[in-house]
Image (spheres, grey):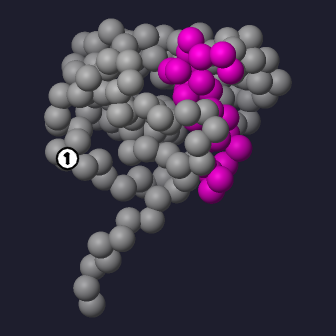
Amino acid sequence: MHPSTHHETLDLPALSAAERLFIWGFRAKARSGGAVPTAADIQQVYDHFRVGDAVLSLESIIEIFACTAHTAIEVHCPTCPRMSDSEHGILHAIAAAQQDRIDIVRERFESWLPPVGADWALAPVRGLATIFRMAGLILPDRQVRSFEHDRTMAMKSWLVGSPTLH
């Protein structure tokens, strides 16, 4: 029997409501500055799902990426049905944080951040995971396909118009 070379990915429509809410919020916050959704829109949606306090954690995580990342993350627009490897990895890290599996969180975040950046991200990641868990929004521990080694190790630009955003 030959191993399959096709990797089936989980895209947005196949995710749970909790996963879709997190990814939408992460994308929307990461792409702030656009006209829609606004910060007030994001806050309103998160408040509706009783996780409004998680918006501050999202902002902190994104700020840590913006200030310390050695490798860019690929973030799609809030309405894109496809998910990037980066988004899968971040989602996996948040799910691991809900289970207090901090070693996995650190490992995932160190793909993009230096050790000090990963350390800084732990508190807001744990906070966000706890807020979601307390609201009954449990993120399943999915095994995601591994990152493409050459993509995660290559230095990428955070310049406007970067191919990592679409």
> Residue 53, can we see it?
no
Residue 122 point in image, percent of width and height:
40, 19
Residue plotted at (26% across, 33% down): 111
Residue 138 against residue 123 in the figure, above or below = below
Q: Which residue is identified by label 1?
A: 149
The stretch in magenta equals 12-36
35 left or right, relative to 97? right
Residue plotted at (66% across, 16% down): 35
Residue plotted at (30% across, 72% down): 5
Residue 98 point in image, percent of width and height:
54, 34
Residue type, mark 1 in image? His
SS at badge 1: helix
115 left or right, relative to 125? left
Residue plotted at (45% across, 17% down): 62
Dot 1 alpha-carbon crowd within 10 angstroms: few under 14, some 14 to 19, many 20 or more? few
Residue 89 point in image, percent of width and height:
40, 40
104 left or right, relative to 148? right
The secondary structure that dominates the magenta segment is helix
Task: Choose between 20 and 53: the one closer to the eye.
Answer: 20
Determine which quarter of the picture holds residue 151. Answer: top left
Task: Choose between 12 and 1: the one closer to the eye.
Answer: 12
Task: Choose between 60 and 99: the one closer to the eye.
Answer: 60
**Where the N terminus falls, by quadrant?**
bottom left
Determine which quarter of the picture holds residue 163. Answer: top left
